[in-house]
């Protein structure tokens, strides 16, 4: 099984799991939910102007200067996959280290106290290590999932309006109904280096949900909750991962997050 997982790298997580056949789309969770109607389209110029203002608001709400100054992050989380009745079928402890300044990442997935695999994004490339196979380069699509994930979640806001291909305010939308509650807000679309991030923001600008493009699936929706402020950044304590039809695939629980810690020198050393 190949995977990379982090609270804000869930797009990469699911992409790799789908590619490896560990998860079948539409095979778990709540009954299907109808996709929301497409809202009226604003003129492109208004979308862009309003989008940049909305991006500034989102940056401020999710961490502001703390996000702008984000250099490193370490996280421990627990990812639980569920069956069609919503019962857990697989629980995976995950630890990760990310160097945003250099674009490096490492994630370790365990099961039963044993390492299942480790994935690395380093100056030398993207690699996966497993006890059975040793270290091998990641396939192109899986490597792209790692690099793309730097532009998702609250950390994806850290650049503000700098270096964006496009920024759009797509207006008010309702994406899903989760446990009887409409997941509704203002949609912000940000494209950076051809990577599209689509955020659903509440009235304060906090990211409450996000759409990820996933190879072979289309879109996956992450719904965030139980926020806590860590190092000035709003970090979700719980993430629900849903397939495009609204079925629940997995739940991620944040166990520990540390911001701007000094990472050990060998953190991104790839095993030989």
Image: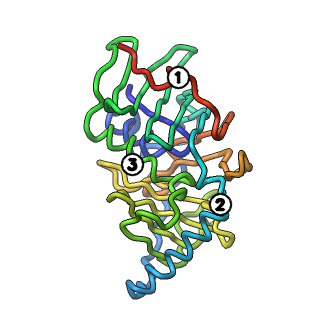
The reply, left or right, for residue 105 in relation to residue 256 is left
Which residue ends up furthest to the left in the rendered image?
Answer: 140
The reply, left or right, for residue 153 in relation to residue 237 is left
Mark identifier at residue 64:
2
Which percent across, then down, holds residue 1? 38, 25
Compared to 1, does 151 lie above or below?
Answer: below
Which percent across, then down, holds residue 88? 58, 33
Circle 2 crowding by C-alpha within 10 Å: few under 14, some 14–19, many from 20: some
Circle 1 crowding by C-alpha within 10 Å: few under 14, some 14–19, many from 20: few
Color theme of the render: rainbow
Q: Secondary structure at mark 1?
A: loop
Compared to 224, does 28 lie above or below?
Answer: above
Compared to 2, does 253 lie above or below?
Answer: below
Residue holding disc 1: 265
Indicate which label's residue lies in the foreground, 1 or 3: 1
> Looking at this view, is 266 or 38 the one in front?
266
The answer to whether any part of residue 19 appears in the image is yes
Q: Secondary structure at mark 2?
A: loop
Tell me what residue is drawn at x 66 percent, y 53 percent.
66
User: Which of disc 2 and disc 1 is earlier in sequence?
Assistant: 2
Mark identifier at residue 148:
3
Indicate which label's residue lies in the foreground, 2 or 3: 2
Distance between the Cα atoms at labels 1 and 3? Answer: 24 Å
Tell me what residue is drawn at x 30 percent, y 30 percent.
138
Indicate which label's residue lies in the foreground, 1 or 2: 1
> Looking at this view, is 193 or 39 the one in front?
193
Which image quarter is the C terminus in? Answer: top left
Tell me what residue is drawn at x 50 percent, y 75 percent.
52
């Amino acid at each position: 099984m190949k995977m990379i997982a982090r609270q804000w790298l869930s797009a990469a997580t699911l992409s790799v799991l789908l590619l490896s056949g560990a998860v079948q789309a539409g095979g778990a969770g709540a009954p299907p939910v109808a996709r929301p109607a497409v809202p009226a389209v604003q003129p492109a110029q208004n979308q862009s102007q309003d989008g940049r203002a909305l991006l500034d608001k989102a940056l401020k709400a999710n961490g502001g200067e703390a996000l702008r100054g984000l250099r490193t992050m370490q996280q421990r989380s627990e990812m639980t996959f569920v069956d069609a009745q919503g019962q857990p079928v697989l629980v995976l402890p995950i630890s990760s280290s990310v160097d945003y300044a250099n674009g490096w990442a490492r994630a370790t997935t365990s099961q039963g106290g044993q390492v299942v695999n480790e994935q690395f994004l380093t100056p030398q490339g993207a690699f996966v290590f497993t006890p059975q196979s040793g270290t091998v380069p990641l396939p192109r699509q899986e490597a792209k999932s790692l690099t793309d994930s730097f532009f998702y979640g609250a950390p994806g806001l850290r650049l503000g309006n700098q270096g964006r291909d496009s920024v759009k305010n797509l207006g008010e939308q309702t994406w899903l109904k989760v446990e009887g509650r409409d997941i509704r807000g203002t949609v912000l679309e940000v494209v950076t280096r051809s990577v599209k991030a689509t955020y659903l923001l509440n009235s304060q600008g906090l990211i409450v949900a996000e759409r990820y493009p996933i190879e072979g699936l289309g879109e996956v929706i992450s719904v965030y909750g139980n926020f806590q402020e860590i190092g000035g950044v709003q970090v979700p304590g719980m993430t629900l991962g849903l397939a495009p039809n609204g079925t629940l695939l997995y739940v991620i629980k944040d166990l520990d997050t540390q911001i701007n810690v000094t990472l050990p020198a060998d953190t991104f050393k790839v095993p030989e």
